[in-house]
Amino acid sequence: MQFVEANGAKIPAIGLGTWELRGRTCARLVEQALRLGYRHIDTAQIYENEREVGDGLRASKVKRDEIFVTTKVWTTHFAPNDLERSTRESLTKLRLTEVDLLLLHWPNPQVPLAETLGALAHVRKLGMARHIGVSNFTVALIEEAVAACPEPLACDQVEYHPYLDQTKVREACARQGMAVVAYSPIAKGRIKNDQTLARIGQGHGKSAAQVCLRWLIQQNVSAIPRTSRIERLSENIDIFDFVLSDEEMIEISGMANAKGRLTDFGFAPKWD
Ligand SMILES: NC(=O)c1ccc[n+]([C@@H]2O[C@H](COP(=O)([O-])OP(=O)(O)OC[C@H]3O[C@@H](n4cnc5c(N)ncnc54)[C@H](OP(=O)(O)O)[C@@H]3O)[C@@H](O)[C@H]2O)c1
């Protein structure tokens, strides 16, 4: 496994995303992923599957200190007392004493950012999170957060795949020593039928999804693809035995377009 290092955190380059995975399916996939060599699991309070993620962690029998677990605090719990209470709830559901990474799921302008970050840093000091970070933060918000946070931020988790240019956010993270963690890294499955990625993959004996994930990790980005199918778990982690050439990397980056963003909400910040 390759790692992305950021402000003291060592984030496994590939993780399992668990959004929309529920119940026994979720627990079984987490368990199976860990048995196949995954060492990074991404969940969130709002996914309502932290209990099942915890079940999968334990069923795998992989040692706790070998696994990197991320969860996220939902925006309605950003007032300082709420954030601490919400983190305790997440830990109880996961049946863990600490997570490896705790993120603010989206920016929430209704609560002063400095207050929320103070609470996030406090939760870290209490030992409930080894590292802290943000998600869906723009360049301006990253800079505001770094200036306001008493503890280092390990990452910004953002949508990132070949159809969406994230150069500005990547550069801002690099300036702050933060990692980029790519969500929807295979564009919610849309890359499956991509002709360019499939053609490049043919030259390496790899699928379009594997080329896409390789393109991300070759930029020192961590990626958290989600699948509900056991056979795809192996496919999505089998990307450490080939290298994309500079020309291939440039060609894939050239696929970004103005309509590439897939996740947008009324409460989203003004994107870069
Ligand atoms: N921070 C945030 O705001 C945020 C937002 C969105 C997502 N996330 C996180 O990021 C994770 C991943 O993002 P995502 O779930 O939106 O999308 P994604 O991982 O880009 O794509 C998931 C879709 O791709 C399909 N798929 C998986 N592996 C494949 C393969 N090898 N070939 C073809 N299709 C494949 C899956 O279908 P099958 O199940 O049929 O395989 C599923 O429909 C989430 O689960 C969540 O943990 C975070």
Image (cartoon, helix red, strand yellow):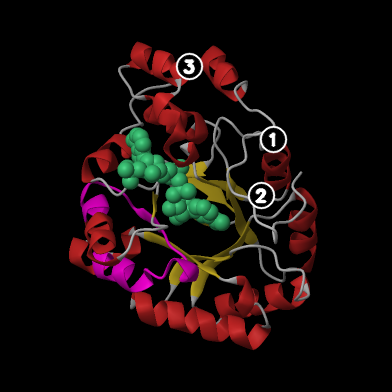
Q: Residue at x 22, y 40 (%)?
A: 231
Please name the amino acid that badge 3 sits on.
Answer: Thr
Q: For the C terminus, which image quadrant?
A: top right
Q: Residue at x 69, y 35 (%)?
A: 167
Q: Earlier in the sequence, mark 1 or mark 2?
A: 1
Q: Residue at x 30, y 33 (%)?
A: 238
Q: Which residue is mark 3?
A: 196
Of 56 and 191, the residue lying toward us = 191
Is residue 48 magenta-colored? yes
Query: Could you give the CA–CA distance between mark 1 and mark 3, rounded to whole angstroms?
Result: 21 Å
- Is 64 on the left or on the right of 200, as rendered? left
Res 1 seen here: no
Q: Which residue is mark 2?
A: 177
Is residue 67 magenta-colored? no
Q: Which residues are magenta?
A: 32-57
Q: Quadrant of residue 93?
A: bottom left
Please name the amino acid that badge 2 sits on.
Answer: Gly
Query: Could you give the CA–CA distance between mark 1 and mark 2, rounded to whole angstroms?
Result: 15 Å
User: Residue 188: x percent and y percent?
Assistant: 46, 42
Of 253 and 222, the residue lying toward us = 253
Query: Could you give the CA–CA distance between mark 2 and mark 3, rounded to whole angstroms?
Result: 32 Å
Q: Which residue is mark 1?
A: 167
Please name the amino acid that badge 1 sits on.
Answer: Thr
Of 8 and 267, the residue lying toward us = 267
Cβ of disc 2 within 8 Å of ligand 1? no
Q: For the N terminus, which image quadrant?
A: top left
Q: Residue at x 20, y 61 (%)?
A: 60
In the displayed structure, 209 sits above or below 202; it is: below
Dot 2, crowdedness within 10 Å: few (<14), some or many (≥20)? some
Tag in front: 1 or 3: 3
Tag in front: 1 or 2: 1
